Image (cartoon, helix red, strand yellow):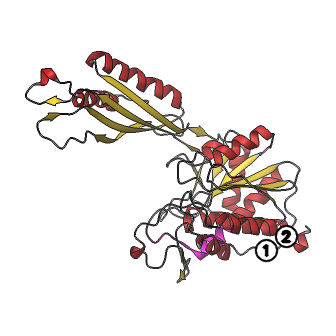
Amino acid sequence: MSAASTPVIDPVALTRDLIRKPSVTPADEGAMDVLERALTALGFHCRRMKFENIENLYARRGTTSPNLCFAGHTDVVPTGSTEAWSSGPFEAEVRDGILYGRGAVDMKGGIAAWVAAVSHSLAASEVPGSLSFLITGDEEGPALHGTKRVVETLMAEGEVIDACIVGEPSSSQVLGDMIKVGRRGSLNTWITVQGKQGHVAYPDRAANPAPVLAKLLAALDAHTLDEGYPEFPPSNLEITTIDIGNPATNVIPAEAKARLNIRFNPTHTGDELMAWLNAMAGEAQAASGLQITLEHLCSGNAFLTGPGPFIDGVQDAVEATIGRRPVASTTGGTSDARFIRAMCPVLELGLVGQTMHQIDERVPVAEIEALTGVYRTVIRTYFDRA
């Protein structure tokens, strides 16, 4: 496809088309089709990669290096009460220059802005290498059959991605004030203490699991995991639920359960934290004589893209476009960047995240257009310096 024949994409119109597909995880509802049509029109080879019931897309234009990738997700979180929205969450209504809809910020607006930026870059012959898209429908959910599976497949096939921009809404207060260059890891643990049910008046005939669980949780909560790590705050362990489910006042329960989450910096790995939790539970089991079982799910380890040409180039591009140099941050929750880092340097750059996951999620139309300009400069700067 020649530069002259390359269509120029309207980022706002594409955002609205994507929002109108109610792609609440794990449903796709045609959102990936909308994106595939836009990318095919730009000359991308689109490969749908479906794992279990999750739609994923890897699209590439060009065969030479370097390969600059954009990653994101078309799935969105549930809307909450639709009656609480000022307009339908999937109507994509624009009022007073503001676009309303689930996914407007997180992150259909970011996807559309990058597609539009690519269309401008291609039309101006500013891409001497390759561009690619890695888009999933499983970022807001368990994330088991989305980006993680796509990355594993691409790596097994020998596909090379040289750098990746994830379009998560990284900006904090105003567009371009922050990029995310790392994220903490996340570990969920379910704890079950098995006791013996009995009458509260005869504790010698029962084995109460509640105080055993309470002591274990107190010991875990009192432990200082670390004092922080360069560019990261200290790791934190949070007890998220304690469940016994005992409706009676005169019955010692048979079991007690709890769940905790650890957000950890690169001082630790998920495996190391699981081993520590298992050891603590083992000590409590030996002291109490009650069986304690733990189940773990580590959704990703911590990562950090260190200072260098990639980050410098993105910061320079943002500053050159909107006059604001973004701060490199590691705050916030997890993102699919944790999987992509296995392939290449990765960072997050996107819209302002103030209304993501909220009722009346919204974004100024002018901000989507401004982000398109930022992305185009990022693309041009990357290939100029490659």
- From the viewer's side, name the closer residue of 10 and 271: 271
Give the class, few, some or many, for how many residues have Cα within 10 Å of label 1's Cα (few <14, many ≥20). Answer: some
From this viewpoint, is residue 17 visible?
Answer: yes
Report the residue marked by disc 1: 8
Residue 35 drawn at (x, y percent): 71, 66
Judged from this view, the residue extending furthest toward the right is 2
Residue type at tag 2: Ala
Horizontal side of residue 315 vs 333, given as left or right: right
Residue 277 drawn at (x, y percent): 41, 26
- Classify residue 255 by image quadrant: top left
Q: Is residue 63 above or below residue 207?
A: below
Report the residue marked by disc 2: 123
- First to last magenta residue range: 359-374
Q: Earlier in the sequence, mark 1 or mark 2?
A: 1
- Magenta stretch encompasses residue 365: yes
Cα distance in 3D space between marks 1 and 2: 7 Å
Tell me, yes or no, whether the two marked residues, 1 and 2, touch with CB atoms within 8 Å: yes
Query: At x 20% / y 27%, what residue is drawn?
Result: 208
Checking the image for residue 83, the label placed there is: none
Query: At x 47% / y 23%, what residue is drawn?
Result: 275
- From the viewer's side, name the closer residue of 89 and 126: 89
From this viewpoint, is residue 267 visible?
Answer: no
- From the viewer's side, name the closer residue of 238 and 375: 238
Q: Which type of secondary structure does the marked residue at label 1 adopt?
A: loop
Horizontal side of residue 295 vs 311, given as left or right: left
Residue 386 drawn at (x, y percent): 82, 48
Q: Which type of secondary structure does the marked residue at label 2 adopt?
A: helix
